Image: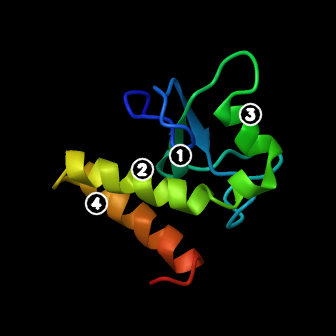
């Protein structure tokens, strides 16, 4: 994840952002699965990671960020158990977005 570009700004990512506020995949004391994570830049200041948490317009773009991240993973893992997990995650997101 951290070797990919930030899903928001394209800068080198140094953290994984797990889906928040959608699909009942996270909540108080509950972090979404790693298969529902996307690369972000993080650190001090107004980072993209912080922006996703604070800006509704970016939170609503999380499905797009996830599908892009998953598709990158599918290119890197054309077969095997990681590929299968990525397909499952992609199908989950698409079903929640009504695009199955």
Residues packed near mark 3 inside 10 Å, few (<14), some (14 to 19) or many (20 plus):
some
For mark 3, give the secondary structure: helix
The x, y position of residue 46, in whole percent, is 75, 26
Sequence order check: which comes first, mark 3 or mark 4?
3
Residue linked to disc 4? 84
> Position of 69 compared to 93: left or right?
left
Residues packed near mark 2 inside 10 Å, few (<14), some (14 to 19) or many (20 plus):
many
Residue 50 image label: 3
For the view shown, which residue lies furthest in the left direction? 79
Q: For the N terminus, give its image quadrant.
A: top left
Q: Which residue is drawn at 66% across and 35% down?
A: 48
Residue linked to disc 1? 37
Residue linked to disc 2? 69
For mark 1, give the secondary structure: strand
The x, y position of residue 95, in whole percent, is 52, 79
Q: Quadrant of residue 90?
A: bottom left
Q: Residue at x 53, y 46 (%)?
A: 37
The x, y position of residue 65, in whole percent, is 52, 53
For mark 2, give the secondary structure: helix
Sequence order check: which comes first, mark 1 or mark 4?
1
Above or below, comparing residue 6 to residue 94 in the picture: above
Sequence order check: which comes first, mark 1 or mark 3?
1
Q: Are marks 3 and 4 in contact (CB under 8 Å)?
A: no
Q: Distance between the residues labelled 1 and 3?
A: 15 Å
Q: Distance between the residues labelled 4 and 2?
A: 15 Å
Q: How far apart are marks 1 and 4 (CA)?
A: 16 Å
Q: Residue at x 28, y 60 (%)?
A: 84
Which numbered mark, 4 or 2, is in the foreground of this view?
2
């Amino acid at each position: 994840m951290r070797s990919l570009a930030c899903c928001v700004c394209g800068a080198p990512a140094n953290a994984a952002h797990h889906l928040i506020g959608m699909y009942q995949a996270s909540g108080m004391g509950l972090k979404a699965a790693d298969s529902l994570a996307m690369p972000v830049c993080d650190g001090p200041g107004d980072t993209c990671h912080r922006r996703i948490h604070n800006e509704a317009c970016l939170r609503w773009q999380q499905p797009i960020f996830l599908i892009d991240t998953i598709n990158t993973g599918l290119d890197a893992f054309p077969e095997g158990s990681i590929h299968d997990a990525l397909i499952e995650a992609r199908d989950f997101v698409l079903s929640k977005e009504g695009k199955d």
